[in-house]
Image: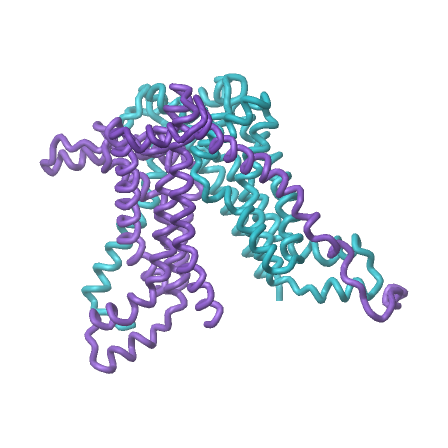
Chain colours: A purple, B cyan
Amino acid sequence: MSALEPTTPSVPKRAGWAWRPFALTLPALLLLVAVIGYPLFTIVLRSLSEPQWGAQNYVWFFGTPVNLTVLQRTFVISAWVTLVCVVCAYPYAYLMTAVGPRVRLALVLCVLIPFWVSGVVRTLSWVILLQDSGVINSVLRSVGLDGVRLIRTQTGVVIGMAQVLLPFMILPLYSVMRGIDLRLMRAAQSLGARPFRAFFTVYLPLSLPGVYAGAIIVFILALGFYITPALLGGPRSTMLSTLVQTQVLSLLQWGRGGAMGVVLLVTTFVLLALAAPVMRSRHREAGRR
Amino acid sequence: MEMKPLTRVILGLVCLLVAIWLVAPTLVVVPMSFNENKSLAFPPQGFSWQWYQNFFTNPDWTSSFLNSLKVASIVAVLATVLGTLAAFGLDRMRARPANVLRMLMLTPMVVPGVVLAIGIYAVYLDAHLVGTLTGFVLAHTILALPFVLIAVSANLEVFDKRLETAAASLGAGALTTFRTVTLPLILPGMLSGLLFAFATSFDEIVVSLFITNPYLKTLPVQIFSSITRDADPTVAAVGTILLCATTLLIGGGMLLLGRERKGRP
């Protein structure tokens, strides 16, 4: 057992690679600069310099009614998707905290299964389901609702996007709800509050951090959605991402496409910055618990 | 918490509907893939294997599938190595710079896909990387990196550093310490990072759509162009194959994990 004999001095030095931790992050950072930083910089630069230097592309973007309509629509669709997600995720996440381990596993699996399936394939499923000759329309027709159009409409886009984004709402909501002490509800009820009142004055406020976190994530992801609106939407449900793609790939207007991209990017980061204090306070609370 | 029976029933029903909404659409590709007609109209007519046959014999589909496998395998290894190194670096840094760098490295998750895609496309056009294996691997690696970083960092957070000190004090060199103490303990994080990185690359579509060309297509690009071009049920067959493959992988992984856990005292 010679290995047990200490060969190093009594003060053990830290493990060898502990030196220069920055060097360890360097490869990842270099790739980040090359494949994220430099391309984004290029886009900002092009939005300001093509065809000539100036803010012309931004003036064009904010001065063209069509663009403003699409910008507004992007926000409206994202807001609808967020709302649908909150409404569907809240009872679902609550049930996850209230059932036994077996049912909970089933509920968790239902949330995770969509993640196993390729995103494009999932959108394909919605194309099949929502098309004019699709399942949902047949059902609607059999109950007398004829001529409801789902594909190539905003409703169709919202349905498809909300399904894809729902897990991002359920998981943060569940992690917050799991930490809520249910004895508080019992205490409120024992003090005479009706179940509804106990829910609205005790449970709901305690679960709001989860709602905020999930809603911010869903809204931000929805803003940048590209595939689902491209496949499920029509000309009247175009979102900003599709417009960017058209400007760059079809019209070769790098300046205009870049300006739109920068607007989308800045909006995303502003929202993230606004959300950061909420998330941080939630973190601190979780740490205290 | 006490619930009235009626509330309980309504809650259960709502959740059942949400669960169906989450899962059912993914399963609709299965019946469609056996359609006899070349159409995606529901319900499918008749029964045939022709779309599976088409997937395995049509060079458009086979080559894009092989490309995706190739790209995703390289990306999984590269992202795991870079992500693990970075996670170690951040773990051993002072908190303030580590937080800034961590946030920077997570940005690929929040930058809207199309914005990133046109940026990368612009740079790749100049660098002649459009439609190349290198181009795909670089772009997918940076998109997969955050997942590895998160997985390995989570593992390092619960990792007891005194174990390394103990190993070092017993005379183990840096490399031996890493190999015999650190690596086995962070292996679960690395493996789940590897899996996530593979899945991210295999599934990536937005950036891929921009940096693809007729010579190099990945599977999601091929699926997307097939959906937009015509109603070819081969996409449903591909969807079904992918669904079965992931279910087998995850089911197998869960079984293995369960057995391992049971085997331990």
Residue B48, image x, y percentages: 37, 23
Q: Nearer the viewer, residue A70 or A148?
A: A70
Q: Residue at x 39, y 65 (%)?
A: A178
Residue B165, image x, y percentages: 75, 65
Residue furthest to the bottom in view is A191
Q: Nearer the viewer, residue A266 or B90?
A: A266
Residue B13, image x, y percentages: 24, 55
B231 is higher (above) or lower (below) than B90: above
When asked about the image quadrant of residue B91, the answer is bottom right
Query: Viewed as shown, does residue B79 lie left or right of B26?
Result: right
Task: Using the rendered image of the protein, determine whether residue A152 is visible from the camera's viewpoint.
Answer: no
- Image quadrant for the N terminus of chain A? bottom right
Query: Viewed as shown, does residue A24 lie left or right of B103?
Result: right
Task: Using the rendered image of the protein, determine whether residue B127 is visible from the camera's viewpoint.
Answer: yes
B262 is higher (above) or lower (below) than A129: below
Q: Residue at x 64, y 60 (%)?
A: B94
Q: Residue at x 63, y 54 (%)?
A: B90
A277 is higher (above) or lower (below) than A84: below
